[in-house]
Amino acid sequence: MSWATPSGQVELVAEFTALPGREQQVEQLLLELTHAVRAEDGCLVFDPYVVTGPPSGAGVVATPAPDGTRYVVVEAYRDADAFAAHLAAPHGAVFNAALRPLIAEPDGSRLTFLRRLA
């Protein structure tokens, strides 16, 4: 599996953009999902973030975000079976159905699978 780490873990980042005015609903859904996913047996990491700008005076140039508030979720699962169980969990389907009309991406969140270099 080229998308699994050398130890067999599945690591990924999910990204999506809340439509303006929908941020509070998105955050509530995301916090509820976080609680459910972290309780899954094979979940190692499920950390949601809201994308912010760099600190003032940091000398960092940030890439402009599209209209709306960006969210990133860093996820890691013990192995492919744990990830498959995560995908099959009913709370994920409920979350995705509720999230879809609240975000800018017409096909849902973008998933980027990661493989550690070291």
Image (tube, helix red, strand yellow):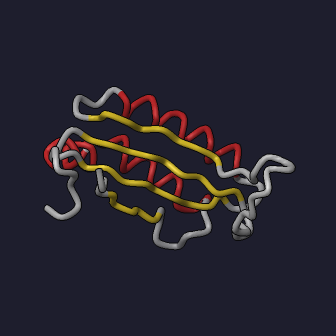
Q: Residue at x 55, y 70 (%)?
A: 105
Residue 83 location in percent, x, y?
A: 23, 47
The one nearer the camera, 94 or 49, is 49
Q: Taking 96 as reference, is 105 left or right?
A: right
Residue located farthest toward the right when viewing the structure as drawn = 57
Q: In which image quadrant can residue 90 be found? A: top left
Q: Residue at x 61, y 68 (%)?
A: 104
Residue 27 location in percent, x, y?
A: 62, 42
Q: Is residue 14 above or below residue 64?
A: above
Residue located farthest toward the bottom when viewing the structure as drawn = 106
Q: Taking 106 as reference, is 84 left or right?
A: left
Give the number of callouts: 0
Q: Taking 76 as reference, is 47 left or right?
A: right
Q: Is residue 107 above or below residue 13?
A: below
Q: In which image quadrant can residue 38 be found? A: top left
The one nearer the camera, 44 or 107, is 44
Residue 58 location in percent, x, y?
A: 79, 50
Residue 70 location in percent, x, y?
A: 64, 57
The one nearer the camera, 7 or 95, is 7
Q: Residue at x 45, y 56 (%)?
A: 14
Q: Quadrant of the N terminus?
A: bottom left
Q: Residue at x 17, y 50 (%)?
A: 6
